[in-house]
Image (cartoon, rainbow, N blue to C red):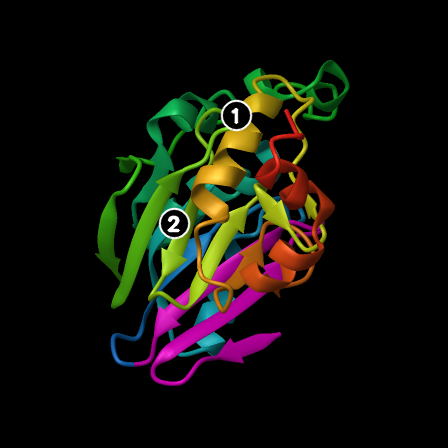
Amino acid sequence: MVEISSGELIVDHLVAAAFATNCWILGSRASGEAIVVDPGIGEPFLDEAVRERSADLGLHPVAAIVTHGHLDHLFSVAPLCSSVRMPAYIHSEDRELLAHPERALSASAQAMIPHGMTFTEPDEVYELTDGMELQLAGLSLRFAHTPGHTPGSVIVTVADQFLISGDLLFAGSIGRTDLPRGSLSDMERSLREKILPLPDELKVLPGHGRTTTIGAERSSNPFLRAAMEGRLG
């Protein structure tokens, strides 16, 4: 799927082989650059596919953004950053998971990691904070800290047109909070304080599943409605 908004913004994505995680590629025709969001688990890595898709779009990746520290969203970030020599961005609360993703996994999920496999964070890492605004790849990015799924989960508003929601908000659902470091009360607060005030027309690019809009979720998502009424946590 390729979505091109009015103007120069390019939005595309790959679906990772494991857990069907959406890896978003967003860029500007004017700059010829792109950000890559949540490069997950390919076969085994996703870095080559990301580089090829970016090239097909006429874009060169210049930064990787990790919306949270779960393995299915960060598995390929180190090899991708190494192969194209770019930094990674992650919230400070989840930074340790770049090198130790097992700390946010259930015991059964930890057992899925191949024996002896280790992780390292990219050579260059920047920590995100709530309200941070950045200009990357010719795009205006605004970050909000949205704990609940993990302590360091973030969402990203791109050019006031798209919301990268990670595993906070999906079409018709929300992220789970029963994994290590998850918090239902934090999830409710993040939905109420950071999602509900957003404009209806904002297009949502989730960590899994199909795209949606804030307006569609406000009117039909039962979990978002429960958060609105204080019944979720």
Position of the C terminus by quadrant: top right
Residue 57 placement (x, y as % from top left): 45, 77
Q: Residue furthest front?
A: 229
Up the image or down, 205 lies above or below 128; here it is below
Q: Which residue is mark 2?
A: 64
Left or right: 203 as drawn, with respect to 27 = right
According to the picture, the residue beneath numbered tag 1 turns out to be: 186
Near-viewer residue (38 or 199): 199
Whether residue 207 can be seen here:
yes
Q: Which residues are magenta?
A: 1-29
Is 109 situated left or right of 96 in this image?
right
Q: Look at label 2 and name its amino acid.
A: Ala
Instruction: Describe residue 224's horizontal placement relative to residue 52 as left or right.
Output: right
Q: Is residue 112 magenta?
A: no
Query: Which residue is at 40% across, 47% downward?
Result: 65
Quadrant position of residue 131: top left
Q: Secondary structure at mark 2?
A: strand
> As drawn, is 179 to the left or to the right of 62?
right
- Above-or-below relation of 222 to 31: above
Taking the image as drawn, is residue 69 in sight? no
Tell me where residue 98 appears, x and y as whole percent.
45, 29
